[in-house]
Amino acid sequence: MDSKSVRDRHAEYLFPSVSNYYEEPVVLAEGEGLRVRDVDGREYLDAFGGILTVSVGHADEDVNEAVTAQVRRLGHVSTLYPTVPMVDLAEKLARITPGALKKSFFVASGTEADETAVMMAQTSTGSSELVALRHGYSGRSALAQSLTAHNGYRGLPTQIASIKHAPAPYCYRCPLKLSYPSCGVACAKDLEELIQTTTTGRVAGMLAEPIQGVGGFITPPREYFEIAAEIVRRYGGVFISDEVQTGFGRTGKMWGIEQYGVEPDMMTMAKGIANGFPLGAVIATPAIADSFTKQTISTFGGNPVSCAAANAVLDKIDRDGLTENAGRRGDELRAGLDELKARHPKVIGDVRGMGLMQALELVVDEAGGDRTPAPAAVAKLFEETKKRGLLIGKGGLYGNVVRISPPLTIGKDEVAEIVSVLGESFSAMESA
Ligand SMILES: Cc1ncc(COP(=O)(O)O)c(C=O)c1O
């Protein structure tokens, strides 16, 4: 079976909206650690990890062992029965999450986790209005699309009226046309007027990503969440940190929101929790968890096999110091990307992110003062890096942001390889 025949059948049998990266999509067949191989035998260094999901490397031995042992033992029971892997995981999450977060509800995706958190915000406060951020991404259900603020991911014009979008803390393209720090983080303070003018004055809460993933790793200023959470709480709401991308050590701390010194009332998580096995979770304070008194089930939520994978992932992150590794390797990656910006000052407009969640925003001519988004440059960079055996990610409202987020197990040499391939690729683009 070659790549072309798989691509042809993909085109014939899948929804056209299932779009792939690259002019000729890569058909991946095998992986080990940071390396993946396609069906034609070509090897790549994976610097996107299946959208920040392969947290401890492809086909990890510990995860594989935990999963195969669990599959042999018991594959499914539904949330109607307690299982050992599920309670083990819930207990671990309570231990490693900040503040009073203690009780978990398991689902099968980030979308469902965000849905659940919104519902819990509403039941626990008795209010229904929610604040979300422009450039945010929450998933693909009707509610998640309403929270999402990217027209490209909104398939229908339906908007749930009780969701209000605040300006994003997007310093490189400040929506208020100010500069940090002289702005005084005006975008965070604007939340108060947003609540006063567009809601009843009592909100259920705010859901936000500590670093906006799909938005292109938009990294808010350090003061942002302290100001935002205080305002939201003053108007009766709870603060929900969407850790679907930033959780599990990715930014160099266990949770993205810990970079901002804020203890959320709820957290949502998915992606990196189980190294690719389908699992999502919401963790809440006991008071919030207890506020939902109707029945609710998630057939696949907390599946024992996914929970076994998650337990193995958490043990490995802890045992191998992977959060610290994300911080150290992230610093090296960032230094390399900053150097690339110095060498390619025209096309690289912004370098941003934390830990192993780093982005390059490509523009028409940064040095000449033209920050027009350059998605065509990203498309070229994708082809050039692919030729050189490197897989990267894309993001941003305009599709002009390169996202680099390899597994947390990455070593020094692999970071150097990513930077070197990116450098060669930018040079090739310039001389073309
Ligand atoms: C921050 C964030 N929240 C929620 C989701 C939705 O997760 P899923 O695709 O697992 O439904 C995503 C997916 O990219 C995400 O990045």
Image: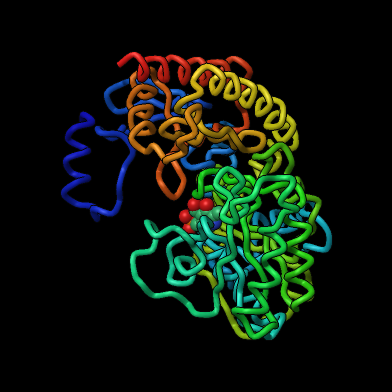
Horizontally, residue 84 falls left or right of residue 109, namely right
Q: Residue furthest front?
A: 368
Q: Is residue 261 above or below residue 411?
A: below
Q: Is residue 267 above or below residue 234?
A: above
> Can residue 279 be seen from the camera position used here?
no
Quadrant in which residue 93 is drawn: bottom right
User: Split into 4 quadrants, where in the image is the C terminus?
Assistant: top left
Q: Residue furthest right?
A: 99
Residue 3 horizontal/vertical position (percent): 23, 31
Counting labels gives 0
- 226 displayed left or right of 241: right
For residue 85, above or below residue 157: above
* Residue shown at 57% from the left, 65% from the top: 114
Residue 95 visible in the current orientation: yes
Residue 252 pos. (x, y %): 71, 36
The residue that appears at 62% across and 33% down in the rendered structure is: 356
Asked if residue 367 lies left or right of residue 356, the reply is left
Across and down, in percent, residue 397 comes to 44, 50
Query: Who is closer to the viewer here, 200 or 252?
Result: 200
Q: Give the image location of residue 25, x and y in percent.
A: 28, 35
Residue located 51% across and 21% down the image: 418
Q: Quadrant of the N terminus?
A: top left
Q: Residue drawn at (44%, 67%), measured in percent from left and top?
A: 141
Q: Quadrant of residue 26?
A: top left
